[in-house]
Amino acid sequence: MEDRESIARALTTLVSIEIAQDNIAQAAVFAQESYDLAQKLGTRPLIALALDSLGDVALFQGEYEKATRLFEQRIKLAEELDDKATIALKRLTLGDIALAQSDFKRATTYARESLSYFRRQGDNPNTATALSAMGDIKLKQGDPAQATHLYKEALQLDETVENKRKSIRRLLRLIDETT
């Protein structure tokens, strides 16, 4: 059983590698294999990892409805495991999906729920991520001033999020040049 659990975990790692290499078709194969194996083993943490992988693949394929369903299943599993941090992270992902679909109300709801949870936990890196998500929403809604405020707040909380920091600095330069 332990060997099959290791294989299921390895498959989810391979999904991430294939996505990073933009080989989504192979990532989809590995994600499904991981899910099938996790289901056979009946191990909730492995099923959770596999659902994450399947959801990531669907998201990268632009299959937003499918990704939403998978991440909602993942949230239900996290609720059964009383894993509040994962619930907040996956709601943030659902917010990203809603934003990609220009559903600002739903995106804002998810981002605010996650932000509230991370602030209560004192989790600065994830609070910064949620603030950045709120900034992304405001920017897409055409409110660069509010987006800038949120990005600056995120930057102050977590200087270690390298990609976010670069994005925030680019945005700040862009806004400074236009004002």
Image (cartoon, helix red, strand yellow):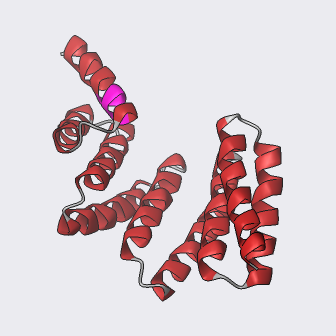
179 left or right of 30 in image: left
Above/below status of 125 relative to 123: above
Residue at x-position 53% and y-position 54%: 97
Relative to 74, residue 27 above or below: above
Question: Magenta residues, as a range?
Answer: 164-168
Q: Report how many numbered discs are placed on residues in the image.
A: 0
Q: Position of residue 171 (x, y in %)?
A: 31, 25
Front one among 12 and 157: 12
* Residue 24 point in image, percent of width and height: 76, 43
Residue 33 vs residue 95, the one in the foreground: 33
Q: Quadrant of the C terminus?
A: top left
Image point (36%, 32%), residue name: 162
Q: Quadrant of residue 63?
A: bottom right
Q: Which of 162/113 is in front?
A: 162
> Where residue 78 appears, x then y in whole percent?
49, 78
In reply to whether residue 118 is colored magenta, the answer given is no
- Residue at 63% in and 56% down: 64
Asked if the magenta segment contains residue 165, the reply would be: yes
Whether residue 63 is visible here, answered yes or no, is no
Whether residue 50 appears in this view of the structure is yes
| 100 left or right of 160 in image | right
Residue 95: image location, x then y, percent: 44, 57
In the foreground, 113 or 85: 85
At x 35%, y 64%, the residue is 109
Residue ranking furthest to the front:
2
Image: 144 above or below 96: above
Majority secondary structure of magenta residues: helix
In which quadrant of the rendered image does the N terminus lie? bottom right
